[in-house]
Structures are given as C-alpha cells and as structure tokens.
Image (cartoon, grey):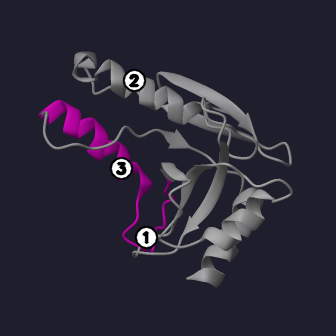
Amino acid sequence: MKMPTGQETISHAAPNGTVELAIRSAPFPGHPEIYSKKDIEKERELAEIDLYNGKTKEGFDIVLIPKTYSTSPGINIHAVKLPAGTSHLGYAASHTGKAHSSDDKVVAKYKQSIPTHFTYSPSILGYYHLSRFLDTGHVEPAIVRTMDLAAHKPLAELGEEKA
C-alpha cells in the first residue's frame, strides 16, 4: 500500500483496530516560512487527537458530536468533562445541535468529502495553505484525517436522526 505523503503522518487505532491516519500536509511549495510556529503547533495538536479515548492537555474528554446545522454534514470534536457512566455516543445524543453548554468547547471539525454535494474536504487544505501564502484573512490550520467507516456510521446515523 502506498502511504500518503506529507510532513508527518500519525497513526491512530479505531475501536475495531482499523488504522486511521492523521497527515500534516506538505507546506506550500518553496515557502515553508509562511507558517507560524502557532500554525505548526495547531497542526500537530490536530494530528494527535485520539477520536475515541482521547483527552486534552487539560484533562477534558474528546467527544465526537454530529454537526446537524448548516448544509454540510460533519462532526464537531468537543472537549468536555464526560459525566461518570456516560458513554461518548450517549453524550453526543444529548448534545447534538448548534448550541452547546458553556462547559464544553469545539476543538476541531471533521469534514468529509461528498462528491454529489458542494463539500470537498481537500478544499479546506487549499484555503489554509493559500491563506498563508497570500497572507490574507484567518483560516484555521487544517490536516487530513481518515476515520474508520464502522466508527463513523453511528455518528452519521445520530446526525441524520437529530437533523
């Protein structure tokens, strides 16, 4: 299998053992200086997120919550204090929607490509890199992240149910 290219690739394991990849893409050709230290740190932080059993540096639990607003489906990655005895999916089921409690924070977004829709994930990478090259606007750092289909399916079904 040919591995994706990029500056750095981090492997993660889905609950069923499938290997998922977090890839920090190569910098804009010939211009590595356009990325700030903060950009690189954020890329690494995104790549290191364990989607299933992760915790933030502050000790918050990582919980995936379907995005049910706007036109493009996705998953918001939240940092929360998961109540004792509450599963990640159970928490997501009771917190799906645009509003979220002040006790949790969206730390990242997972967007998938949908070829029949106007959602195309590689565009997000292009926006990020081009914004640095042109030194215009503020576009959050972005990486490529794969996600196991079996792990994604319950979240997609929850999102469809709650939308």
Q: Which residues are magenta?
A: 110-134
- The reply to whether callout 1 and callout 2 are in contact (CB within 8 Å) is no
Report the disc number at residue 134: none
The residue at the point 52 percent across, 30 percent down is: 45
Q: Quadrant of residue 31?
A: top left
Tell me, yes or no, whether the highlighted magenta stretch contains residue 43: no
The residue at the point 58 percent across, 26 percent down is: 9
Instruction: Residue type at mark 3: give it.
Output: Ile
Q: Which of the marked residues, 1 or 3, is nearer the chain's N terminus? A: 1
Of residues 155 and 56, the one nearer the viewer is: 56
- The reply to whether callout 3 and callout 2 are in contact (CB within 8 Å) is no
Disc 2 crowd, CA 10 A, few/some/many (<14, 14-19, 20+): few
Q: Marks 3 and 2: which is nearer the front?
A: 2
Mark 3 lies on residue: 124
Mark 2 lies on residue: 40
Instruction: Note whether 106 is above or below 95 in the view shown.
Output: above
Mark 1 lies on residue: 72
Say whether residue 129 is visible.
yes
Instruction: Note whether 64 is above or below 70 in the view shown.
Output: above
Name the spot of residue 56 as percent of width and height, x first: 61, 35
Name the spot of residue 32 as percent of width and height, x first: 28, 18
Tell me, yes or no, whether the highlighted magenta stretch contains residue 119: yes
Name the spot of residue 101 as percent of width and height, x first: 54, 62
Determine the CA span between mark 1 and mark 2.
Answer: 27 Å
The residue at the point 37 percent across, 37 percent down is: 141
Determine the CA span between mark 3 and mark 2.
Answer: 16 Å
Q: Which of the marked residues, 1 or 2, is nearer the chain's N terminus? A: 2
Name the spot of residue 160 as percent of width and height, x first: 61, 80
Secondary element at image label 3: helix
Secondary element at image label 1: loop
